[in-house]
Amino acid sequence: MTGDADATRIAVTGAGGRMGREVLEAAAIREDVAVGLAVNRTPTDPVAGVDVADAARLDDLIADAGGDAHADVLVDFTGPESAVEYAETAAEAGVAVVTGTTGFDSGGTARLCAASEAVPLLRSSNFARGVAALRRAVRDAVAAVPGYDVEVTETHHNGKRDAPSGTARTLLDDVEGVREELAGSDALDRRVNGREGDAPRSPGEIGVHARRAGDVTGEHEVLLAGNRETLSLTHRAGDRGVFAEGALDAAAWLAGRDPGWYEFDDVLGGGRDGGAATAEDAAR
């Protein structure tokens, strides 16, 4: 195990992937977290001095025969199906879960919600503090200029699978949430992905654009336009390390908390009062 004896013990899944490696490398230079276990589904050489085990053995590795957990928090950046399986394994062992995986369908989200009834579970589409600030700015801007057209554009590396990105979907949820508060049941937001042919903008439309190119870490822009003016709110991530650091901040914060569903805003002090959300709230 790496790190200080009093540090939060983490288990890292997908240790051979882009984000798994970033998490292990970031953890190696922190004193508040200690890597107790790293797993991957394919054979992987040690990462940041940590041996990587076969993910098929996670059930046996995460807790001993007596049920004592070898980690406080599982940190996951894998894929929707594997993330759900890992979360369920962690919940059975009494280990909290932090996941930055995106692309869950309704069934996967429901299974994560069920796991959050047993252990604290924090899911975020983006662990950059700047994105948390962007989300707050977007909500304020949409409220300040009701009726303005909104377009959301995201750009990622050419290997990213889900489109639009989880962060873009979160930003869209924020925009629609504010508009619904302002217009109530009369809100008629409709997401339109890209444009082709004869495609004029219609009332209540939110344009969504996903670009995949090169090795772009992540860029998100929310454009608001109307009344002969435009407002552009943008976040760019310089490298994946910012996401790894945020996930480790979340892990250190989540350890020891009550079971329930948490969000990154809770870590930053901008979340709900009174603790975790219920599973029913999380599924909405």
Image (cartoon, rainbow, N blue to C red):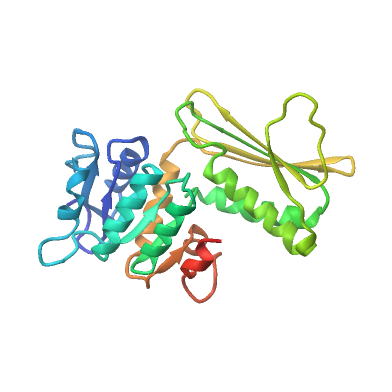
Horizontal side of 62 relative to 283 (left or right) equals: left
Indicate whether 170 appears above or below 215.
below
The image shows residue 3 at horizontal and vertical percentages of 22, 53
Residue 197: image location, x then y, percent: 76, 24
Q: Quadrant of residue 20?
A: top left
Extreme residue toward the left, this view: 65
* In-front residue for pair 152/243: 152
Instruction: Name the residue rendered at 34%, 69% in the picture.
Output: 118
As displayed, is residue 153 above or below residue 270?
Answer: above
Residue in front for this viewpoint, 31 or 57? 57
**Residue at the image position 54 percent from the left and 40 percent from the top:** 165
Residue ID at (38%, 55%): 98
Q: Residue 110: x, y in percent?
A: 44, 59
Which residue occupies the foreground of this view, 115 or 257? 115
Left or right: where 102 falls relative to 43: right
Q: Position of residue 4 (x, y in %)?
A: 22, 58
The correct choice, above or below, for 5 with respect to 197 in the image is below
